[in-house]
Each structure stands twice: as structure tokens, then as C-alpha cells.
Amino acid sequence: MPIATPEVYNEMLDRAKAGKFAYPAINVTSSQTLNAALRGFAEAESDGIVQISTGGAEFLGGQYSKDMVTGAVALAEYAHVLAEKYPVNIALHTDHCPKDKLDGYVRPLIAISEERVKAGRNPLFQSHMWDGSAETLADNLSIAQELLERAHAAKIILEVEITPTGGEEDGVSHEINDELYTTVDDAIRTAEALGLGEKGRYLLAASFGNVHGVYKPGNVVLRPELLKELSEGVAARFGKPASPGPFDFVFHGGSGSTEQEIQTALENGVVKMNLDTDTQYAFTRPVAGHMFQNYDGVLKVDGEVGNKKAYDPRTWGKLAEAGMAARVVEATQNLRSAGNKIK
């Protein structure tokens, strides 16, 4: 199927919310990791989301110029061609973009989609994330209002992060402390500024103790039940039904979460869960194993010539793709999206 149209993407999110499941949002940094993500979704018969962070886009742009927009556009265009060979719907998204990178990343990408839509085409990306968690909530929402207006006109969904996620990702870091929990007042102020759909659809990355990166179970205190409190508080304030809830929530820092934490999050309105750390490891681990097991083949040891078949990037690249694809399948099963593709 081709990359999801705006209408299909909205249908995907509606189905997830109504069915209490979520789509894995898989960070990719290359054509190989893109293939792995698409393969995983196809094998699981799950629609899904592929996303590119600022660091991923810079890497994709090549180390000569490190141009984020070029990198993101190049992989998005490639994805539009490649996705037609996979029997699932895929939405393209850009991950965490802080204030100092908006002019070098999200705003130019929105402009590209604006031109495409004016020409009668669909947007290049289906959603973009504005990460204003390092700003005051007032400044965060002010910028979000500007971006939401532009995104809505270009048939794009905006993702906003209103309070910090702990840990570090692409240079944006927050301490792990009590500020990692969004309050009902934060949620109400967000609804007041951005509306509840009438100004454009947006995804909300609310914080319930989330932490980016690697951590062992028990080292982070997640409270996904907090999402229900946010929904009920906003629903009461604006006279909306508390179920299925006024927000489309996003689960950040999902790697390493327990099955129970994930299930509670799904029951409380999460429709998208980001995965990067776990899929990075799933991609790299088979490569490491191949290199250790074929040491004298991938290196020219003691004047020998090595084994071309061992160091051919296609040899270990196929193993990496399979490893990451399997982790994507696991994610779709955990998030209940497996077997739920739009027919």
C-alpha cells in the first residue's frame, strides 16, 4: 500500500483509540532500518508509524553536510516508493524537535508539505512533533498554536510534548524527578490553547514518569493510570465524554516498559508508542554476533585476505534487518495492533 493519506492516518488513529490499541512508532536512520520496520509491520499484519528524529535526519543527510531537511526528505521520498510493496498502511512522522531546531527541521518540512497540498498532492509527512518540554508551558503552547494552524492547513497532524520526558534523546535531556508527571492543570491549559480537535488534530505526549534510553525494570516509576486522570479532568472542564477521552496520547520512552504498564496505558487512551532503544539493539546485536563469530573473515588477519562473503554488508545487513523486524513484530503484539491493519 502507499504511504497513508491524511484520511487513512486519521482512520488509523480513530481505530486505535476505539479499539484500545496503539501503533508502534519506530525510529529509523537508514534505508536498512526502514526496511526492517516495514517488514516487521507487514509480518505482523499491523499498520504502523515510521519516524525520523533530528539526529536521525542529520545522519541520513550524510556526514559531509549533515543537513536534517535533506536527510528527512530523502528517506521520506524513498519510503513513499518502497511502502507500495508492503501490504500495510504506514504513516511518516518526525520525532522530537526542540525550539532551537524548528527553523532547521520542522518548519521547512511543513513548508514542503504546504506546497505539495497546494499542488493537489498529499503531504510528505503525515505528522510532526514539536518538543517544547524544555520551555515554559506558556511558550510551549504559543509555538504549538502557530505550528498547529500550519499543520492543519497542510493536512498534517501535530504532536506536542507539554511536560518533560526524562533521560536524553538527540541532545534534549531532562532530569528524572517529580516534574515528569503532567498535571490536570497542564492538560486543561493545553486544551484551552489548542482546542479539542476543532483547531486541528494533535497527539499529546503527556508525561507519566517516562524516561528515554536504557533502564532496567524498577528503575523508573511509570504511572500510566495518570492519563485517565488527565482525560477525566479535561472532559469535566469542557463538558466532553470521559470515554474514549478528549486526547490522543503518545507513550514516550517505551523501551523497557513492563507488559502491565503498556496495557494500562492502552486502556487510558495511548494510540502511539515510540520505540528506539530496543529496536536499535535488535538491529545491532546480530551484527555484533556475526562479527565475533566471523572475526577472521571480516578482518584481514595476519596478512590473509579475509572472506568477502563474511564482510559483505549484505550478509550482516540481512541479519540486522531480521533482528529488528522481529522486535517490531513483538511491539505490535504488545500494543495489540498486530492483525489490526485496515483492510
Image: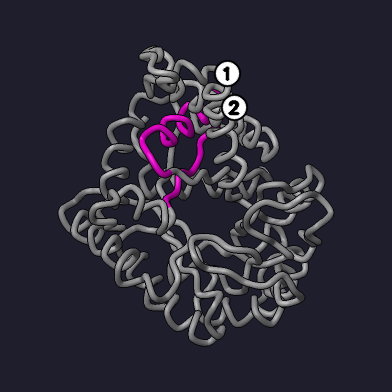
Kindly state the secondary structure of the residue where label 1 is placed: helix
Rendered location of residue 155, percent (x, y): 34, 58
The residue beneath circle 2 is 326
Q: Is residue 337 placed above or below 124 in the rendered structure?
A: above
**Crowd band around label 1 with a 10 angstrom C-alpha radius: few (<14), some (14–19), many (20+):** few
What residue range appears in magenta? 29-52
**Crowd band around label 2 with a 10 angstrom C-alpha radius: few (<14), some (14–19), many (20+):** many
Residue 60 visible to the viewer: yes
Point 42% across, 79% down: residue: 143
Q: Is residue 131 magenta?
A: no
Q: Which of 269 and 163 lies nearest the eye of the viewer?
A: 163
- Residue 293 numbered mark, or none: 1
Q: Which of 343 and 45 lies nearest the eye of the viewer?
A: 45
Rendered location of residue 107, percent (x, y): 30, 68
Residue 201 visible to the viewer: no
Q: Which amino acid does label 1 sit on?
A: Gln
Point 76% across, 76% down: residue: 178
Which quarter shows the N terminus? top left
Q: Which of 295 and 226 lies nearest the eye of the viewer?
A: 295
Q: Which of 116 and 317 lies nearest the eye of the viewer?
A: 317
Kindly state the secondary structure of the residue where label 2 is placed: helix
Q: Is residue 232 placed above or below 272 in the rendered structure?
A: below
Q: What residue type is labelled 2?
A: Ala
Mark nearest the camera among 2 and 1 is 1
Q: How far apart are marks 2 and 1 (CA)?
A: 21 Å
Point 44% across, 25% down: residue: 317
Which quadrant would residue 185 be assigned to in this image?
Answer: bottom right
